[in-house]
Image (spheres, rainbow, N blue to C red):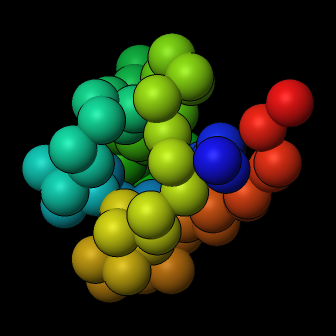
């Protein structure tokens, strides 16, 4: 089974929250960090449930999400 990790490219994120709505595992949340454009950046919670489905990256209109797959030990 594979595990995933999500990397948010902060300066591209506009805080639209589409990725949060799409994540069925609850691995994303609205963050407190604000980027240079003044948008609240989404954060990866990393509670170990991410399966690397990439739905968050697919729905992101600004290509601000990278999903990294790792082999589970």
Q: Quadrant of the C terminus?
A: top right
Residue in the picture at 54% in, 57% down:
52
59 and 30: which is toward the camera: 59
Report the side of 13 relative to 30 (left or right). Answer: right
The extreme left residue here reads 21
Residue 19: x %, y % from top left: 28, 57
In this rendering, is residue 58 above or below 16?
below
Quarter assignment of residue 66 = bottom right
Report the side of 6 relative to 50 (left or right). Answer: right
Residue in the picture at 78% in, 37% down:
72
Quarter assignment of residue 46 = top right
Residue in the picture at 28% in, 77% down:
59
**Can residue 24 be seen?**
yes
Residue 41: x %, y % from top left: 44, 42
In this rendering, is residue 11 above or below 38?
below
Report the side of 49 relative to 59 (left or right). Answer: right
Residue 44: x %, y % from top left: 52, 33
22 and 50: which is toward the camera: 50
18 and 26: which is toward the camera: 26
Residue 69: x %, y % from top left: 73, 58
């Amino acid at each position: 089974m594979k595990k995933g990790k999500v990397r948010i490219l902060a300066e591209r994120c506009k805080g639209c929250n589409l990725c949060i709505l799409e994540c069925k595992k609850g691995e994303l949340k609205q963050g407190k960090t604000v980027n240079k454009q003044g948008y609240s950046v989404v954060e990866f919670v990393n509670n170990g449930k991410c399966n690397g489905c990439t739905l968050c990256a697919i729905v992101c209109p600004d290509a601000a999400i990278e999903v990294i797959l790792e082999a589970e030990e």
